[in-house]
Amino acid sequence: MPDYVDYPLIKKDSLEKRLYQETILDTCVKGNTMVVIPTGMGKTACAVLLAAHRMNKVGGKVMVLAPTRPLVEQHKKTFAGFMEIAEGDMKIFTGKINPSQREKEYKKATMVFATPQVIQNDIISGRFSFSDYSLLVIDECHRGVKDYPYPFIAEFYMKRASDPKILGLTASPGGTKDKIDQVCKNLYFDSVEIRTEKDEDVEPYVQKIKMEWKMVELPEEFKKVHELITKALRERYKKLKEMEFTDTVDLRKRDLLQMQGRFRSILSKCASPNPAIFHGISVLAEALKIEHCLNLLETQGSKSLLEYFKRMRDAADKGKTKAVKRIMKDPKMETAFIKAYDLVGEGIEHPKLSELYKILEKQFRDYPRSKVIVFSHYRDTVNRIVGIIKEMENCRPIGFFGQAGEDGLTQKKQVMILEKFKELKYNTIICTSVGEEGLDIPAVDLVVFYEPVPSEIRTIQRRGRTGRQKSGRVVVLIAKDTRDEAFFWVAKHREKKMKYVLRNMRNHYDEKQSKIGEYN
């Protein structure tokens, strides 16, 4: 096996030799490979090593793609730290650079770090060609499905490069064989290399992550509101069944979204659809909004529910949609609205808030220099948590969310917050899903899930924010007998299934390569 760490392009003593990385690189040298390694275990180091190998043995240029500008900048910084390549030969390309200027700079660069949208646009407009590139690195390659630019770029690269090689990096490619197969097909992967925390060659480098699940019980006052909203929702399900759009009243949000997709398909194909379709669409819209009310009550609390009720009332007053008008005139929903007001007025909030406060208070009392990330699905909850914990001793929190909306954070503001987080000017980030991937968030001591997410990819991304250079802790808050519990088990099952599928795929590729070797 080649000793990749000793390649002339790798800075001396900059990379620690790890057997699993060298084994993975041996596979990557032979063919296009998707590498699945836990976050913090050196996915980028594999890319650096392969880049050094290709440039040393084949020549040519290297391109590294990542979903966001901050992640692109992070990769460039990492490669510069490991490789003996002049800083001026490593160039970043994002939408902020003028297209004509990009065209000139491509010719000067030895290593290109870019967002995929920019490269796709420049390929289409004829400003960029892959003819002299010997390696394409695709970070967060699980995004390589549907209309995301990765498949388009990979196809163009495979057709235009004289000696192509593709390396895909991800911690979580997806929970089903179909999804993973689609990523492999779209991005031309011949091989899959997977390592988990339990693999013998990885285990010595793994920092332990302590997982905790905190169960909370909804207060009785919540349950009364829950019953009202549930009855209103069941009435809509019953209507949909009577209209023969479903054969059951035991529906979930996923079923509603699938039904919505069928309605859209019918409308797009039929010039004069049956009027019953429009009635069904309206009832479905009511069901989705009422289902969201239940979700807010169960997982976020009375204040989030009240704010949503207020927005629906304003929309109804302005006559925006008939569905909202009917919801707000429903006696059960009217009563639930009043009770939500009462709950907030009496200060009866979701028990997760007090549980979170206790967790953070103890963390900063025991470890005052801790760094913490709290993930929450909703921006309203992020702001509420910040407001509640900002007076806590040793806690310096900041809300962190995406760019959309009036109070959205620009990417420049996001980067500034993360820099202050690294410097401990802030020590607690309360964030939405924007913090799961695509940003250079440093390793933290504690990660809290304010609610579980039913996605194995998002669960792995969140959990991977801790346990990098040192051991970490993850706490998941779960409201008993709610969708929180269902989401928790769904994500757990999907992650287990994903690892099983990947291991089978690795065995399949190993057998295929073995047969090729025997034949040759």
Image (cartoon, rainbow, N blue to C red):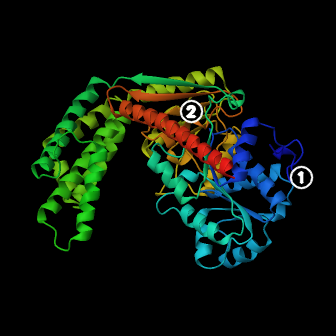
In the rendered view, does 159 fall on the left or right side of 60? left
Q: Is residue 379 above or below residue 279?
A: above
Q: Are marks 2 and 1 in contact (CB under 8 Å)?
A: no
| Classed neighbour count for the residue bearing mark 2: other residues with Cα under 10 Å, few (<14), some (14–19), many (≥20) | many
Q: Is residue 274 above or below residue 8?
A: below
Q: Is residue 129 above or below residue 373?
A: below
Q: Nearer the viewer, residue 426 or 107?
A: 107
Q: Nearer the viewer, residue 458 or 61?
A: 61
Q: Residue at x 62, y 25 (%)?
A: 364
Determine the image quadrant of residue 2: top right
Q: Nearer the viewer, residue 62 or 446?
A: 62
Amino acid carrying mark 2 in the image: Val
Question: Which element type, helix, strand or loop, lies under badge 1?
Answer: loop
> Residue 397 location, x and y as percent?
58, 37
* Disc 2 from disc 1: Cα separation: 39 Å
Residue under label 2:
447
Q: Nearer the viewer, residue 134 or 105?
A: 134
Front label number (2 vs 1): 1
> Residue 17 location, x and y as percent?
81, 38
Residue under label 1:
8
Does any portion of residue 365 appear in the rendered image? Answer: yes
> Residue 334 location, x and y as percent?
18, 42
